[in-house]
Each structure stands twice: as structure tokens, then as C-alpha cells.
Image (tube, coloured by chain):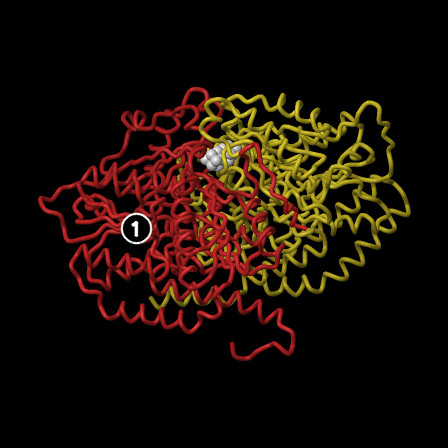
Chain colours: A red, B yellow
Amino acid sequence: MLNFTPKELQERKSGGMINPAKTCQPIGAMYAALGIHRCLPHSHGSQGCCSYHRMHLTRHFRDPVMASTSSFTEGASVFGGGANLKTSIKNVFAIYDPDIMAIHTTCLTETIGDDIPAYLGTAEIPEGKIVIHCNTPSYVGSHITGFSNMTKGMVTYLSEASTETKKEQVNLIPGFVNPGDMREIKRLVKVMGINFIMFPDTSGVVDSPMTGKFEMYPKGGTTIGELKDTGNSRLTLALGSFASTDASLALERKCKVPAKIMKTPIGVKATDEFLMALRNGFVKEIPYELEEERGQLVDIMTDTHYHFHGKKVAVFGDPDIVIGLTEFVLSLGMIPVHVLTGTPGNAFEKELRAMLLEAGIKGNVKASGDLFEFHQWIKNETVDLIIGNTYGKYIARAEDIPLVRVGFPILDRSVHSYMPIVGYKGAMRLIEMISGALLDKQDRDAADEDFELVM
Amino acid sequence: MEMDAGLWALEERKDSITVKGKHKKQLKCDTDSVAGCVSQRACVYCGARVVLNPITDAVHLVHGPIGCASYTWDIRGSLSSGSELYRNSFSTDLQEEDVIFGGEKKLARAINDLVEKCNPKLVFVYSTCIVGVIGDDLEAVCKAAAKKHDIEVIPVQSSGFIGNKAAGYRAACDALTRLIAPQKSVKMFRNRSINYLGDFNLAGEAWIIKNYIKQMGIDINVTFTGDSNYEALKKAPQASLNIIQCAGSMSYLAQKMQEQYEIPYIRVSFLGIEDTSESLRRIAEAFNDKEITRRTEKLIKNEIEKVRPTIEGYREKLSGSKAAVYVGGGFKAISLIKQFREIGIEVVMIGTQTGRQDEYDTINTLVDDGTVVLDDANPTELERFMVQKGANLLVGGVKERPLAYKLGVAFVDHNHDRKHPLSGFTGAVNFAREVYSTVCSPVWKFVQQGRQSL
Ligand code: SF4
Ligand code: SF4
């Protein structure tokens, strides 16, 4: 069986990982770069890394994911990758003709100490084309760190404060979320009647429609013009502190755009806070349309609260998402007894401990964890539900616990990347998924006499 | 349509693309990818991992930063009839300080941890790019760990930048050669069985073949490496014949085994009815035994009778369709051309990631004039030629699937993501059904409609 995890918790002395709950920086940087219009992400390193990152993203989004590689060979790893990078830049613009090329590094190029800015200084970049970069050593942080670094790179290279007074517009940094979430966040802001720039924005790129034609650069993505203009906005809302803080602070420093760092708007409370921040920042009323949505959500929560109350849940995934999800399940009356992310960060543990403390719950909380440990926790204190990405299915099966798939990557189900989990609508969807999972199991396990039509 | 393949392509790529009947020159292959290409190629580690991963009761420990291990966690659909240990992901998760001060100590501790937790007889330690650069002495750490725990700990030298996937196959074969080497004290007896090299038991394919061979009156000693384990692999030198299916990954091992244990080998392919029958006959021939030959002929006859009507049915529906093929190895590409012919489909574009010169030569004799042949293609090239040649089906791996779909072209995964066994007679039917269900799916109508109504 796939259930080799022993129940006894033994201390691990190595700091190695068994069944990781994170992956490496470059894939995050690649994903962020896809959120720029007509951008080709470029992986500076061996071709293998690039191939893996594209494959993984392709499996999650079920859309083509384009990225080029410096294709390192032994020589490059001894003498440095300058020549490879320069050739790459030449070839990328000659063959694939993007407007912008976004370079990230890999473990290899970080370890040999390649100095990208120095190489860029002497590279031939065609007139009117742009090259940006960020460093993404995978032995630091996780894919979320990589996403954050590339988003920050957009600010460092492109944002400009060019107007005297700031424009009535807000910058939205969505964090490492699906295009469906990005669309939903944009919709909320549109309904509020506020101008905005979202960056990065992968909607329209990795959820592009079927046209019968392959577009190397689909319609979506933040344009270069918009990225420059982020320096003129009145406010930046950084959604998700792990993925979005650095870019927003860089923008504050560089262009004096005040940054407000918030949770990823998952659930009523975080969505309320998001809309309030917009209302206060731009002196706007919350339109009835959104009040109505919120009312519907609360109505659903009251209609169904008895399904959730007191149910134990284990949540894992990327830090910003897990923080949002935990807050939301608490608001449903559920008890998150195990909460884990693979991404390192004390802030994660601090925030969640405070949340659990306030709710009077004693639970396991860990950053830099892996799913082996998570499984051990569950073996020692079982739960009614697991929320996390596809990798949770091994535990779900071994312990016969329903799994609600949320986060990255989801490799075994489709449509998820088109549908939001953020905003009031996203919360409704989460409720539908959670109650569906709980009640399906109840139906399956019920004895004939307990099997009910109306639930 | 006539076209000059070199016209639009990048200068450096020109020699890697030919059109049958048009170009006299030889295709350039087995070269490194061009810097700045959207290459579909994988790395040495990937190649090594793919070959060794199906060994079910081994701990596969990736020495490197987390990514390399994350991306290879249980992604190959190799089935096991025993242990499931291989489906877990183990990584030393190197951190900045390890990169600066070296990762040897951490590796040694990780092995200790894993031995304590999983109690394996065999541990593979894969080196990734970064390990090659920081210069950890894998060999020494593995040796010490093996001694300490009295198990086998084998280093796999798979730093990614020292070549492509083919180099990884070699690294894996080196590790296997080490593994199967008998201790001096152990005497090996030859028996009348065969080793089956180059089947990873995707969707249970090796089991199908094993069953055929058994019906012929021969035993499979061990499969490299589908559904294999430590004990079984250790007995590998006892076999009297090696058959190799995925030649790209296993020829090297077969040669080594011939040198070291005098086990002869033959190449086989179990893709399609023609190649399967022919391969089974060649195995029987190698044993030169009347009874085996009789059983083999009976098996082939029975199986063909069973599947022929179904395949004929699909052939009628599919006839006239055109396929584009982009797969890992050259040998598979060759089989696919024949197999497509069996179901009435013409191959109009064919490429591989790691095909060798002799394989490309064979491909060239098999395909019709005008067929585009290319090595290490990038998506732009695949798209161009698929559109140009009017392919309505692409055979490829994960990254090619969405590309095909976006073009409104049907797709069959002939890689890790295959869902049904494609080997043997049973596999031939599955293949025809899979091709049919994608080529003739109603969804393509909506793509066409969409195009017209907008
Ligand atoms: S080497 Fe580094 S960048 Fe490449 S896949 Fe491994 S962890 Fe990721
Ligand atoms: S780091 Fe090297 S070994 Fe790891 S995925 Fe990249 S190319 Fe392959």
C-alpha cells in the first residue's frame, strides 16, 4: 500500500524532505513572468529544470507553457554562463519575438555565481525590446519566493513614477493564485468602479480559449505600459504577504506608492477587508451588487453551518492560501487541527498560532514541513477533511478521509484553474466543495436506516 | 505542399530537420540544444530517474535542492505488484549553507533517517546539477553509509548539465551494472529464462509481455526495471537471454551484461501486431526448441485472431488520417510508424528527443516522401509542420498535449501519462481505440464551428 508512513513521530536529524509540500523558486518566477503580456520566461541554467517547470505548469493549467532555456553544458558550468545567456537573448528575440524576456536563474547558475546584470549590460538587446531578471536560488525559500522575486523584478526594472500627482488607480498584486482568482479579484474592483492595474496577471494566458490556433503569446497578461504605470498609482494592495510583499515595498520605495499588505481575500472576513481597503483608499461606496453577494454568502453559511460545525480539518499548501483557508474554515465553525506549509517562514507559524489561539484551538502548525510529517499528525489525530493540493490524495486514500483540492499543483482534476476561491463567489464555491465532500462521504458510509434524502 | 524546412528555421537548427525525398544530407542529431530554444528536452537526472524509478522497494533519494525531487514525485505510471516505496519523494532539500559548506554531511544524515524509517535494502542517491558543482563526494558518502547500515547504497551520477537524457540512461545503466554484480563468493547458475530490458511497466505493460513469454514456455527472470525489486535484480546474471525493448535506455546495459556475463541480447518491440509477432518469433528462435516454437506460433495465431476484427474496424474509421509523432527515443518512433500503418494512418511528421543516427536512417527508409523528420524539435517547429502537413493527430508527451489541443488536433500520450497499456496484442487494440476515441471525438466539431462562426 501507499501507506508506509509510521504513526510514531521520530525526530528527523537530517533536515531532508519526504514527500515535499513545496517546490523550487524558478517555477514560481516562470509563472509570474507568464503574467506579462507577450513575455517569454527564460530559465538560465540546464535544460532539464526548464523542462520540468514547463511540464509541471502544463499539468496544472492544461495549457501550453512556453519558456526558453540557456541549455547549459559542462563548459558553461565551468566558465560561467555569460556566453550562453547572450546567445539565448539573441536567439529568443530572433525566433520567438516576444516583447519582453524575463530571466530567472536556477540552482546551477546561482551556485557558479553568474552575474546576470553584468551580462545584461553587454548583451545585444534589439531596439524596443526589454529584458528583465530576478535571482531564484532554489536552496532558499520555495516556488512562492520565486514568484515574489519575479514580481519584484517587474517593479525594479519597469515601474516609473512619471506623473506629478498620483493617478486614481490601484495596483493589485494577486500573489500565486489561479487565473480564475485573478479574474474574480479584477471583477470585484471593476464593480467598485475603481481603475486598476493587476500584475502579474496570468488570466488570458494560461486559461486562454480554444481558437484552433496556437498562440505563442495569448491575449492576456499585464502590458509593459501598465507595468510602467504602476509607479503612478495611488495605492498598492499586496494580496498575500508571502507572494506579494516584496514587490509592493519595492514600489513604495521606488515610486512612493503606498503599499498595503493584506491576506489573500479568501472567505468573508478577508474579502470584507479587501473591499474596505478599496473603499477607504478611494472614497467609494460598496455597490449593492457586492452587498448582495455578501448577503448571499452569509445566507449560505447559515443554511449549512450545521454540516461544518465541530468538524476537524487538516490544511496544507502555499502559505498565503493556507492562511486564508484556515481563517475561512474557522468562520464556518470547523476546527483546523493540522496546518502546514512547505515554504519556510516564521511569520506563517506566528500568524496561524495567533488565529488558533484566538479560536481556542490546540493544533499543529508548521512552516518548512513536508507531507510525511503531515500524515503522521493525521495518524495521531484524525480529521474529517483534508484541504490541499493533489499530493494530499495519498493521505486521503490511506486514511479514508475526503480531500478538497485547492492550491497548486492540482494534477488530477480539471477546471479548477478557471474557478475562483477568492471573493464572496469563491467562498461560495469553497462551501460547495467542502460540504459536497463531507456529505458524499456521509452518504457513502451511511447504514440503510440512516441514509437520508434531505440533508 | 512543398516547402523548404530550412527557410524559416534558425540557422543552427537547419541541420536537425529534413524532408524525406528532398534533402540528401544526413540529419544532425544527438547534439546539445541551442541556447535560447524552447527545447522539449529533459536532463541527465530525468533520464536516470526514469530508468531506475520503477524499482519498487528502493529508496530513491535526490541529493539536491527540492525542485528536482518535487517534479519527479510519482509522475511515472509504473505499476508495482509489491512495494510502493518508490512512489514517495525523498530529497536532501539542500539549503544555502549546504551549498556553501557542502552537502555531504546532510546526505549522510538523510540516509540514516531513511534507513531508520523505511528499512530499505537498496538506496539510490541521485546527484543533481548543483551537487556536481559543489563537488560533494557521493561515492564516499554512499560507501560509508552502505557499510554502516549493511545495505546497498548506490550513487547515480546524474548532474544535469553533463549531457541530455541519453547520458542519464547511461548513468542509470552504470548504477544497475553495479547493483547486479554478484559477490565473488556467490556462484551463479544459468537457467532457461530471459531478462526483459526497457519496459517500465507503464499501465502494466510488462505484465502483458510476461504473460506471453510464459505461454511460450519461457520464464522472465527479471524486468529492467518495471515492477522489479532488489532481490529479483540481483538474480539478473542467471538469465540466458536478454531482450531489449526501449533500446535508447538499455542497449548500454545489454552490452555490459554480454561482456560480463556472456548473456546475448536481441532487440524487440512490442508495439503493434507486426512488431509484437515478429519479436516473439525471434525470442523463440533464440531458444531453438521445437516445443517453444510451436507454442509461440499458436499464441500469435490465437492473439491475432482475437484482435484482428476490432483493429480492422478501427482501421476503416481511421483510414486516411494523418499523424505527427514526437517521442523520446528513435526505436519507439520506428515502431509507431509501422503501427500507424496497421490502422490506416500515414505519418507525416516524425521527431525524437534522443534518436540516434542509425535510427533516423531506418525512419527514413520507412516513411513516405515528403514526411518531415526532425531532431529535438521546439513547439514552434512542431506547430509549423503539423499545420503544414495537415496532421490530425499528434503523439507525444505532457508538454505536447495542450499544444495539439490548441491547434484543434487530436492527441495520444505515448509517454508517462499513458492511461492504457499499449504493448503487445492487447496494447495494439488499446492503441487503436485510443487513437479512434481522440481523432473521432465530437469535440473537434465545435472547434471547427467556432472558427467558422466567428
Ligand atoms: S536544480 Fe534547482 S531549479 Fe532546477 S529543478 Fe532542481 S531545484 Fe529547481
Ligand atoms: S538541476 Fe540539473 S538535474 Fe535537476 S532538473 Fe535541473 S537540469 Fe536536471
Amino acid tagged 1: Met
For this orientation, the residue located farthest to the left is A164
Q: How crowded is mark 1: few (under 14 residues within 10 Å), some or many (20 or more)?
A: some
Q: Position of residue B166 (x, y in %)?
A: 58, 33
Q: Nearer the viewer, residue A362 or B413?
A: A362
Does the rendering let one see residue B16? no
Residue shown at the point (22%, 54%) measured from the top left: A196
Q: Nearer the viewer, residue A278 or B187?
A: A278
Vertical arrangement, residue A378 with respect to residue A299, above or below: above
**Side of A100 where B290 appears, left or right:** right
Q: Which chain carries label 1?
A: A
Badge 1 is on which residue?
A: A262
Does the rendering let one see residue A12? yes
Residue B266 lies in what quarter of the image? top right
For this orientation, the residue located farthest to the front is A360
Vertical arrangement, residue A207 with respect to residue A227, above or below: below
Check disc 1 and report its element: helix, strand or loop. Answer: strand
Answer yes or no: disc 1 within 8 Å of ligand 1.
Answer: no
Number of numbered discs visible in the structure rendering: 1
Q: Where is residue A20 in the image (x, y as percent from the top left)?
A: 52, 43
Vertical arrangement, residue B154 with respect to residue A97, above or below: above
Residue B230 lies in what quarter of the image? top right
**Side of B176 where B413 appears, left or right:** left
Residue shown at the point (17%, 57%) measured from the top left: A282
For this orientation, the residue located farthest to the right is B290
Q: Where is residue B33 in the image (x, y as percent from the top left)?
A: 47, 33
Q: Where is residue B359 in the image (x, y as percent from the top left)?
A: 61, 37
